[in-house]
Image (spheres, rainbow, N blue to C red):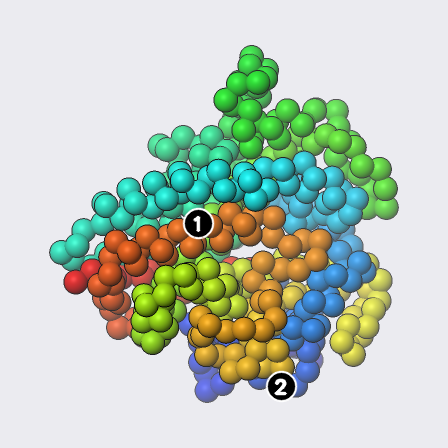
Amino acid sequence: MTALTLQDLAPDGLDPAADPYPAYATLRAKGPVHRVLVPGSGECWLVVTRDAARAALTDPRLRNDIRHSATWRSDGGHAIGRNMLQTDPPQHTRLRRLVAPHFTAGRIAALRPGIESMARELLHGLPEDRPVDLVSRYALPLPVTVICDLLGVPASDRALFHTWSNELVMPTSPEAATSAAAALTAYLTDLIETRRDAVAHDPGGPDTDLLGGLVAAAREDAPGDRPAHDDSTPAHLSAEELLGMAFLILVAGHETTVNLISSTVHALLAHPDQLALLRADPGLVAATVEESLRYNSPVHATAFRFAAEALDLAGTRIPGGDPVLISLAAASRDPLHFPEPDRFDIRRAGPAHLGFGHGLHHCLGAPLARVEATVALSLLLAHRPTLTLATDPTALTWRTSTLLRGLTALPVSFH
C-alpha cells in the first residue's frame, strides 16, 4: 500500500503549503512515527512528536550519511562537496570543530554592531509612501549581506548567489536545481581559489577570516572522505570538504534567517495583541523570536537520516536502511509539551522548541540567526512604528521544501 502525502492527510483538502499544522495534528493523534510519501523523495518514516523527535535526534543508529540508505548506489546526493549535514562522527566531529570557533558568543557579539548598521541602512531605504515587500527589501538582504561578508562574496554577486541558493533548497525543477548546483559549485571553487591565493600571500592578513581560516585548515591530500567506520580524525579539511563547508555556510547561513525574520513579522501582524505586548515591552524581543521559532519553524524538518540497523523508534519498527525525516515543526507544536500549541504567545513559558534541532547536529549558526532576527525585529518596530500588513492575509504564499518553509513575499505599509 502506497503511503499518504501531507496533502492527502490535510483536513478538507487544506493546502499543507499554506498551513501544514492540521496534517501534523492528524498524524500526532495517531502516534509519534508514520510512514509517509514525500513527493520527489519517496517514502520515509516521519517523526511528529517532541519526545520521539528528541529521541531520534540523539539516536546514534540514525545516520546522516546517505551511504547508510538501503537504496544508495552513488554519492550523487552530495550536490556540492561534503558537509556536516551529510556526515556522522567522527567526520562530523572534526568538521564541526574546525568551524565552531567562528561562531562563538564572542565572535557573534562582535558582529552585532555591523548587523545593526546594515539593518538601519536597509530601513532608511524603504519608502514610506507606498507598500513594500519586507522579504525582498529587508528580511532577505540583511542575512545575505552578513553571511556574504563573512565569506567574502562580492556585493555584485550576492543576488545571483541567492538565486542559486534558493533553487537548491526549494527547486522549481530537477533541471533548474542541477544547473544551479553546477553554477554555485563553479562559483565557490573560484572563490576558494581566490581566498587561497590571498592567504598564501599574507597568512596573517585580513583575508584570514571565516573562509580564509577554513582555507588555511585545508590541504589537498587530506583523507577527508574516509569510510563510515573509520575512527580517525585528521585535523584538516579535504578540498571536497572545504567546498561543502563553504556551500553549507553560505546557504544555511541565510536561507533560514530570511524565513525567520519574515515569519516573525508575519506572526506579529497576524496577532495584534502580541504585537501590542511587544511594543509595550521591547524587552520581549528575544522571547518573541523564540516563540516564532516554535510556532512556525523556518527549518521545517531535518535532513533525511538513515537507519544504520533495524531499530525501534517510539514503538515503531524501522527497518535497516530506511530513511527517517524528523519534523521539527510538528514536534514544536506537540500539545503534550506546549499547551494550546497553535496559539502564538510571546510570553510562553515551558520546554525549549526544536527549531534549531537537538543533539550533535544542533544548528551551529543558531546564535548568529538569533542576533540577526532580534536586531531586525527591534529596529524595524522602532523605526517603523506604524507597520501594518498591506494585503489580504489569504493572498500570502509560502515557499516550501522538505527542509524549509518561508513566505515568498510580505507586503507591508508604514502609514
Residue under the point 86% across and 42% down: 231
On the image, the x and y values in percent for residue 234 come to 79, 32
Q: Quadrant of residue 305?
A: bottom right
Query: What kind of residue is marked 2?
Result: Ala
Query: What kind of residue is marked 1?
Result: Glu
The answer for how far apart the CA atoms under marks 1 and 2 are is 36 Å
Crowding at mark 1 (Cα within 10 Å: few <14, some 14-19, many 20+): many
Left or right, 74 with reference to 112: right
* Residue 375 position (above or below residue 268): above
Residue under the point 81% across and 46% down: 228
Residue 263 visible from this viewpoint: no
**Quarter of the figure with the C terminus:** bottom left
User: Which label number is shown at residue 47?
Assistant: none
Residue 118 visible from this viewpoint: yes
Which residue in the protein does label 2 denote? 29
**Quarter of the figure with the N terminus:** bottom right
Crowding at mark 2 (Cα within 10 Å: few <14, some 14-19, many 20+): few
Left or right, 40 with reference to 71: left
Sequence-first tag of 1 and 2? 2
Query: What element does badge 2 sit on?
Result: helix
Q: Quadrant of residue 8?
A: bottom right
What is the residue that sits farthest to the top in this orientation? 201
On the image, the x and y values in percent for residue 374 come to 42, 55
Which residue in the protein does label 1 denote? 372
On the image, the x and y values in percent for residue 302 come to 62, 60
Residue under the point 37% across and 44% down: 116
| Front position in the image: 405 or 37 | 405
| Front position in the image: 348 or 144 | 348
Query: What element does badge 1 sit on?
Result: helix
Residue under the point 40% across and 40% down: 113
